């Protein structure tokens, strides 16, 4: 049996271990943190991510810790409704779309790894410093001076990956979009049907606010844990660290004009249990992931803007594909090359597409068409069919064609061109 090392016990590294185990391989995971904590805020697991979770045998466990997405609703900066679209199975897809806390999701995967492979599979406090590979294997060198030898190594050590830095010394710069993200969670009574993702604000004047529930009955009295992300142009760039906390002062009044009736946005921000600031950053696509017996998975391979849930979902897909290849091809270097051939080009396109506005473009189009003024009837600004067509086109471009898409050649406005998908241009390098 192949002796595989995985660097990093984030969602990507843990999912890769579970998928390898399904192929009869038990890897060793080396994690830098001396103790794992359920860090982060909300993540959006798309239908294709839930498919991966289901195939890992974790759907029931996942349902217990997450909230099913029912619909997705867009509002102007004045709180006027633009459009609602159903989500997941409610839209006719085969799988659910679900919202969850990143840390809770990571711990669900961690528990499954320990149950199936034993607690010793995850070695904490082992921060990789470098590696040396030869024809027969790879020697890992840790920061504490200890070493370990394995047949092959998968670097799943996140956006600041040490494995990537050694493989690509000249291609590890982080690109900053010019947007700072305030990411918070608030314990509050459910709004609407308890499964709605809200997209609020005019993108020019206010910036953008996305809100969705990530856990039910957080306080034993029926409250939900609600995740919100506020994107602000031109704010000072935060540190590239997921754990930098701030207060609500900067943003609590930005959405004061938004009167939703069922949600007091300012109160939700003021009452937050925690708020983090994080720059909207990614890495330029890499032209190579695999070098002999060493390869990359998850954010180490393709860090993308943490919007729309694609980062974690793509890591789940990587995990399946790399395990399938290692299960089918005896030589790990050949298996890694086959994994990369199947994944890299597609994911690289997604990294670029994620820099664009995606479905949030609708709020800008309505803002432009209405001159930023309240309207009497949205149909006067953008007819319903035009909006439907626009969303169907987006889902086609995102690789999740809507089950009810029967446009038969009716194309409508070409909004999601290569150019508009890149509209949020990369503004500067962080380092
Ligand atoms: C603390 C934290 C909080 C996050 N919060 C959010 C969030 O709220 N929303 C969101 O969309 N995304 C968040 N992310 C990113 C998200 O987890 C990833 O985009 C996605 O899940 C892919 O996961 P990954 O396993 O590839 O990378 P990550 O989740 O970044 O995991 C990488 C793991 O590798 C470990 N590691 C790093 N360097 C070394 C080393 N040298 N040796 C050994 N281990 C190492 C890290 O400690 C970490 O556990 C967060 C990431 C982190 C690390």
Image: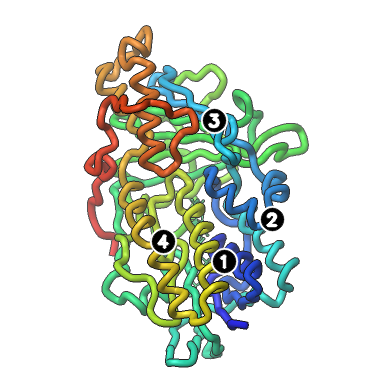
Q: Tags 3 and 2 in contact by the CB under 8 Å rule?
A: no
Residue drawn at point x = 40 percent, y = 59 percent: 303
Q: Closer to us: mark 1 or mark 2?
A: 2
Res. 100 image quadrant: top right
Left/right placement of residue 17 relative to residue 247 reads right
Q: Which residue in the structure is indicated by mark 4? A: 343
Residue 8 screen position, x and y as percent = 54, 70
Neighbour class for label 1 at 10 Å: few (<14), some, many (≥20)?
Answer: many
Residue at the spot of label 1: 16
Name the side, left or right, on which 202 lies relative to 318. Answer: left
The residue that appears at 46% across and 53% down in the rendered structure is: 311
In-front residue for pair 250/182: 182
In terms of image quadrants, where is residue 74?
top left
Give the residue furthest to the top: 376
Disc 4: CA contacts within 10 A as few (<14), some (14-19) or many (>=20): some
> Which residue in the protein does label 2 denote?
57
Residue sitting at x 66%, y 29%: 189
Say whether marks 1 and 2 touch (CB < 8 Å).
no
What SS does tag 4 mark? helix
Q: Earlier in the sequence, mark 1 or mark 2?
A: 1
Mark before the other along the chain sequence, 3 or 4: 3
Residue 91: image tag: 3
Mark-to-mark CA distance, 3 and 2? 24 Å
Asked whether residue 145 appears in the rendered view, the answer is: yes
């Amino acid at each position: 049996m192949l002796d595989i090392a995985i660097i990093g016990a984030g969602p990507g590294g843990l999912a890769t271990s579970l998928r390898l185990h399904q192929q009869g391989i038990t890897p060793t995971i080396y994690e830098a943190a001396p103790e794992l904590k359920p860090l982060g805020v909300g993540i959006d697991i798309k239908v294709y991510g839930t498919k991966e979770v289901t195939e890992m045998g974790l759907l029931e466990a996942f349902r217990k810790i997450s909230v099913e997405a029912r619909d997705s609703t867009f509002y102007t900066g004045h709180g006027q409704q633009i459009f609602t679209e159903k989500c997941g199975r409610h839209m006719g897809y085969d799988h659910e779309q679900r919202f969850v806390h990143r840390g809770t999701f990571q711990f669900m995967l961690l528990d499954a790894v320990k149950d199936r492979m034993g607690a010793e599979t995850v070695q904490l406090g082992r921060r990789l410093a470098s590696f040396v590979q030869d024809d027969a294997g790879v020697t890992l060198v840790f920061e504490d001076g200890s070493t370990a030898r394995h047949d092959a190594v998968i670097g799943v050590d996140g956006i600041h990956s040490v494995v990537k830095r050694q493989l690509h010394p000249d291609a590890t710069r982080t690109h900053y979009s010019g947007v700072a993200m305030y990411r918070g969670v608030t314990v509050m009574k459910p709004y609407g049907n308890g499964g709605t993702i809200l997209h609020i604000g005019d993108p020019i004047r206010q910036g953008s606010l996305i809100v969705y529930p990530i856990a039910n009955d957080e306080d034993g009295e029926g409250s939900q844990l609600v995740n919100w992300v506020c994107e602000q142009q031109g704010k000072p760039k935060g540190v590239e660290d997921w754990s930098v906390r701030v207060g609500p002062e900067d943003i609590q009044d930005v959405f004061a004009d938004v009167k939703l009736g069922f949600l007091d946005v300012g109160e939700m921000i003021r009452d937050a249990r925690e708020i983090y600031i994080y720059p909207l950053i990614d890495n330029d696509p890499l032209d190579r992931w695999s070098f002999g017996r060493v390869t990359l998975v998850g954010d180490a391979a393709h860090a993308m803007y943490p919007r729309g849930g694609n980062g974690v979902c793509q890591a789940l897909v990587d995990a399946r594909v790399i395990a399938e290849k290692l299960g089918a091809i005896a030589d790990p270097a050949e298996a890694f090359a086959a994994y990369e051939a199947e994944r890299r080009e597609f994911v690289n396109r997604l990294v670029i597409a994620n820099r664009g506005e995606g479905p949030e473009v609708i709020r800008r189009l309505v803002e432009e068409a209405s001159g930023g003024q309240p309207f009497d009837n949205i149909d006067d600004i953008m007819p319903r069919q035009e909006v439907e067509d626009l969303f169907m086109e987006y889902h086609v471009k995102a690789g999740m064609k809507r089950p009810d898409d029967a446009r038969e050649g009716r194309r409508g406005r070409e909004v999601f061109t290569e150019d508009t998908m890149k509209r949020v241009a990369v503004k500067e390098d962080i380092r």
